[in-house]
Image: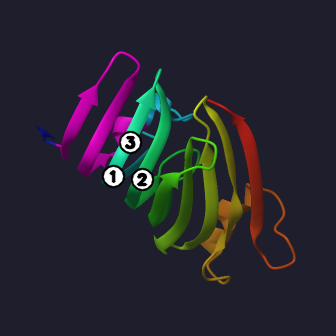
């Protein structure tokens, strides 16, 4: 059990020479706890993550496998522009051939998001999906998304990113 002013986690940690396993991990942590891994300046986003993980396996610092769910609640972007992002849900499952597959969707947000994230056991990632304003008449959300380029004929912004982390 890890408890601090801004986080509360319970679960079981099993550590070996090559693998680390977190089992039955439940709790909440602030988005700020992820800043070392985010490609943004410190303080760029706020919100909290609710973790409901049956198992998370790590090997050599990379996530090897996961099963469970993660909720991002009350997310607010402060950089590069201030915007309320809202809440999102991700279902995590082991990926075919190792790694993790996450299916991500909005739950309470001005954004409509449907995405899939695949994290390979060696650090490769593939993020693809569609993002758009939930309400096409919401000018603030349309202005935020305009930085992504031109929408497709349905007003949505398809995306497809691959890389290594």
Tag 3 secondary structure:
strand
Q: Residues within 10 Å of mark 3 (few under 14, many from 20)?
A: many
Q: Which of 155 and 103 lies nearest the eye of the viewer?
A: 103
Q: Magenta segment, principal secondary structure?
A: strand
Residue at image location 48% in from the left, 42% down from the top: 65
**Callouts 1 and 2 close, C-beta under 8 Å:** yes
Q: CA distance from mark 3 to mark 1?
A: 7 Å
Q: Give the class, few, some or many, for how many residues have Cα within 10 Å of label 2's Cα (few <14, many ≥20).
A: many
Residue appearing at x 85%, y 71% in the figure: 152
Q: Which residue is identified by label 2?
A: 67
Label 3 close to label 1 by CB (< 8 Å): yes
Q: Earlier in the sequence, mark 2 or mark 3?
A: 3
Residue 53 is labelled as: 1
* Identity of the residue drawn at 63% across and 49% down: 96
**How many badges with numbers are in the image?**
3
The x, y position of residue 27, in whole percent, is 23, 51
Q: Is residue 133 left or right of residue 22?
A: right
Which of the two residues, 122 or 82, is positioned nearer the viewer here?
122
Instruction: Measuring from the top left, give residue 10's x and y in whole percent.
Output: 17, 45
As drawn, which residue projects farthest toward the top? 17
Tell me the crowding category of disc 1: few under 14, some 14 to 19, or many 20 or more residues within 10 angstroms, Cα based.
many
Q: CA distance from mark 2 to mark 3?
A: 7 Å
Q: Which residues are magenta?
A: 6-34
Picture quarter with the N terminus: top left
- Residue where numbered disc 3 is placed: 56
Residue 11 position, x and y percent, is 20, 44
Q: How far separated are the C-alphas under marks 1 and 2?
A: 6 Å
Above-or-below relation of 91 to 139? above
Is the residue 120 above or below the residue 118 in the image? above
Q: Judging from the image, what secondary structure is the residue with disc 1 in? A: strand
């Amino acid at each position: 059990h890890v408890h601090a002013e801004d986080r509360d986690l319970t679960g079981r940690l099993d550590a070996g020479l090559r693998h680390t396993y977190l089992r039955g991990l439940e709790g909440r942590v602030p988005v700020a706890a992820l800043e070392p891994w985010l490609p943004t300046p410190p303080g760029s986003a706020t919100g909290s993550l609710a973790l409901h993980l049956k198992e998370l396996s790590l090997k050599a610092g990379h996530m090897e496998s996961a099963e469970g769910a993660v909720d991002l609640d009350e997310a607010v972007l402060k950089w590069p522009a201030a915007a309320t992002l809202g809440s999102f849900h991700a279902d995590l499952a082991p990926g075919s051939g190792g790694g993790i597959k996450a299916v991500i969707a909005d739950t309470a947000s001005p954004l409509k998001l449907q995405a899939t994230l695949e994290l390979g056991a060696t650090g490769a990632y593939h993020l693809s999906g569609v993002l758009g304003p939930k309400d096409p008449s919401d000018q603030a959300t349309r202005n935020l998304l305009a930085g992504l380029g031109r929408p497709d004929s349905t007003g949505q912004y398809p995306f497809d990113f691959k890389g290594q982390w």
